[in-house]
Image (tube, grey):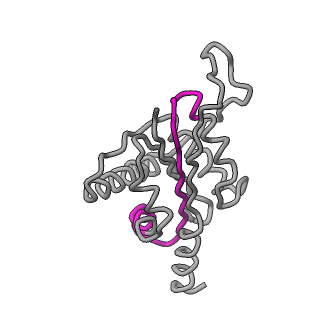
Amino acid sequence: MNQYMKKLLWIILIFISSCSYKQLIENLPEMPSSIPSPNPIPSVVTSPDIQQLEKSLFTQINQYRQSQNLPTLKWDNSISQQSRIHAQKMANGEAGFNHDGFQERVEVISQEIRLHSAAENLANNFGYSNPGKQAVDGWINSPGHHKNMVGDYDLTGIGIAKDTEGTYYFNQIFIKTR
């Protein structure tokens, strides 16, 4: 596939992969901390390069929010864990490049964080020297993703995974706390 077609496909995928979950989470029961979760959260190990890319994406998102006179987001490890799990599943083929399971990710996060609303951005790309910048630029230029980036959220988590062919998968979850 030539470079033009790869870029066009990436732009189309970025455009259709934005998801918001604005429903109030008030009906979810509070989980006592002494009861073990019936679905243990798998551990996702990330390489130092991927961790650096996640932090770079976080910085870029906050720089963009500041340029729009918006408050910066705070990093949350439990949100990042859910983002990493989904990114890894997309990268290894266990999940499609889509928002399937988003509500379940939000429910897991809600066991740790009292939240009001949530949104999710996805991206994937291949062959760029700075895949994180490419993802952020794509989100800025996509109305649905942009809406999430500049939305009324205060916490975020980012997960990135790379498949065996070198394609990067990005997942960012945005949370508005109560």
Image location (x, y in percent) of residue 176: 46, 40
Residue at 44%, 36% (x, y): give it: 76
Q: Quadrant of residue 43?
A: top right
Whether residue 75 is situated above or below residue 148 in the rendered picture: above
Image location (x, y in percent) of residue 20: 56, 53
Whether residue 128 is situated above or below residue 154 in the rendered picture: below
* Bounds of the magenta segment: 109-137
Image location (x, y in percent) of residue 72: 31, 46
Whether residue 28 is situated above or below residue 140 in the rendered picture: above
Residue at 53%, 45% (x, y): give it: 118
Q: Quadrant of residue 15?
A: bottom right
55 or 14, which lies in front? 14
Residue 19 part of the magenta-drawn span = no
Residue at 41%, 63% (x, y): give it: 136
Image location (x, y in percent) of residue 130: 40, 66
Image quarter of the N terminus: bottom right
